[in-house]
Amino acid sequence: MKEHHGYGAGDVSEAVIEATGLTKGYGATLALDSLDLEVPAGAVFGYLGPNGAGKTTTIRLLLGLLRPTSGQATIHGHDTWRERNEVHRRVGYLPGDFYGYAALTATQYLRYLARLRGRADVDWDVVEVLAKRFHLDLDRRIATLSHGNRQKVGLIQAFMHEPDLVVLDEPTSGLDPLMQNEFLALVREARDAGRTVVLSSHALDEVEAVADMVGILREGRLVVVDEVANLRSRARRRLDLTFEGSVPAAALRQVAGVRDLGVDGRTARLTVDGSLSELLELAAPFGIENVSSHETDLEDIFLAYYEDR
Amino acid sequence: MFGTVLTKSLRDQVRSFTGWSIGIVVLVVLMVALWPSVRDMPDLETFLANYPEGVKELFGIEAFGTGAGYLNAELFSLMLPAVFLVYSIGRGARLVAGDEQNGTLEVVLSTPVSRVRVLLETAGALVASVAALGGVLLIAALGGDLVTDMHVGVPALATGTLAMVLLGWEHGLLALAVGAATGRRGLAVGVAAGFALLSYILYVAATLVSSLSTWGPISPFHQALHSGPVGAGVPVGYVWMFLGGAVFLGASLPMFGRRDIATA
């Protein structure tokens, strides 16, 4: 229980976030159940879990917005509850439900936050560059912005003071695919600059492109921490393969990792554990008309892990 | 532009402040305009004599024929306290709990500004805006005094205004404190309004029922209105109103610091 999920054994890099037995309960229910976690400096950590699993609770504990019921967390060695002002100096935060002051323009709002942080800590050029990248008109009142554009304001305020640690709760919500790519580029740049990024999501596919390591939360408990590559190799995917002729069911069953094969006309519905290469190699000669893949279900990843253990 | 929670909070109140200021000016102008006809009523004395004793005392009816007495009865005993309470409680409840419930507090509290400072600066903004509303009242009343022959004078109007401001401060800070301690705007309004209502009932009861009269002085309304407030000088009771507000705010500081912040 007390074992720490780290980023590889014998890791020498300093842990930016360290949680030990971090627990948050509301009455009889545990929103977060004794979380032990270390996030090393310079990593991009994807924090995954279905809605209601405890991602937002964890993040708000890290920001000192919630008081732990038991256990503790530190950021750069500072207790996230008792020394939250110290923590806040070095962290950028995008809430899961971001709300700016509707009556202010984006410029007024960001300048306000910049001054709360101390003028010296925010280079306004950074704000303008980010606004340009995200095609955000800073002169518009927040009330008149679409959900996606408000989210951009939230992202800019999280990044504008170039913090050591950026904590983003469901950051891509409301962003169109183009802006999502821009966002992922921003996260990569932050990592390349040596910063640490934590981003939560309910879907692996959203974070796997940037995350170095991933933690999966389920009903308040951290069930998996692993590198994305490992996770991917164990991931269980659901595929629909439509063949030009009839489905070579017998051949498909022979492929390692294939399970739950069902045939519906010329379409084979199946589940594959791990790599797809063997399956596709074998199936290709039969003439594949269409392949459609379903979003990787986190439940399936848990199951793959549990069955392996 | 604004650089702190204080100035931001002040800015948030501009619209509401302007509206209430206009309301106060209209109220004062109306009452002052009626003064000459009241003063010239031929049988004013007999008319006033018919009021029940309690009402006479509550509204200072005995002095109705003087400018100060008229202002006390028509404005400073009920109308203006109500205006100051509604404004102060509404603003006080909105400042922290309102921002928390609409989700905007979350980001502000993730900056290095401490919760103590956020609360103190919003309290400062509340105190300043209620004082400014008092300033508007004082100017309007002085204007009325100048164009009529009420002969109330600056000191008397100033103490009357001070009583309104103190009532506003105490109840506004209570609403702010409850909002900061609980994060619930509705509860903040409810507690502060309930406190005002109880305090008013106690004031009225202590005035009407002699066996309760010793309890009167603990009521903020008694402290504010008992001897005027226009033309009452500066009674010791004013100190209690000021202290009351400070105690409410002081008590809420650790509670705001130690509780979970709610999501919108």
Image (cartoon, helix red, strand yellow):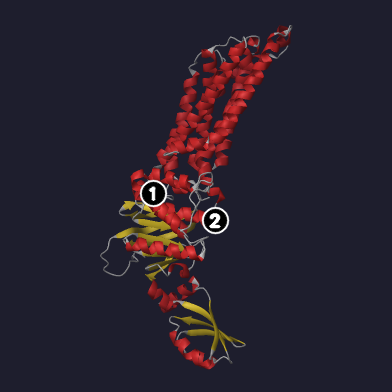
Residue sitting at x 47%, y 70%: A205
Query: Disc 2 versus disc 1: distance between alpha carbons?
Result: 24 Å
Left or right: B263 as drawn, with respect to A3:
right
Between residue A252 and residue A224, name the one nearer to us.
A252
Q: Is residue A115 above or below residue A305?
A: above
Residue B232 appears in the rendering: no
Name which quarter of the figure residue B227 lies in.
Answer: top right
Characterize the local packing of mark 1: few (<14), some (14-19) or many (20 or more) Cα atoms within 10 angstroms: some
Give the number of marks.
Answer: 2
- Depth check: give the residue in front, B195 or B36: B36
Tell me if mark 2 has few (under 14), some (14-19) or many (20+) residues whose alpha carbon lies within 10 angstroms of its own.
some
Q: Which mark is residue A304?
A: none
Q: Chain of mark 1?
A: A
Q: Nearer the viewer, residue B134 or B175?
A: B134
Quarter of the image where the C terminus of chain A is located: bottom left
Q: Amino acid at mark 2?
A: His
Q: Identify the residue shown where x is 66% and y is 20%.
A: B30
Mark 2 or mark 1: name the one nearer the start of the chain: 1
Mark 2 belongs to chain: A
Q: Amino acid at mark 1?
A: Trp
Task: Describe the element under mark 2 as helix, strand or loop.
Answer: helix
Tag 2 residue: A147
SS category of the residue bearing label 1: helix
Q: Which residue carries the number 1 mark? A: A124
- Give the quarter of the figure containing the N terminus of chain A: bottom left
Q: Where is residue A241 drawn, in percent x and y?
A: 54, 84
| Residue A273 horizontal side relative to residue A44, left or right | right
Q: For residue A291, say whether it is visible.
A: yes
Q: Residue A251: x and y, percent?
A: 50, 93
In the rendered structure, the answer to whether residue B195 lies left or right of residue A192 reads right
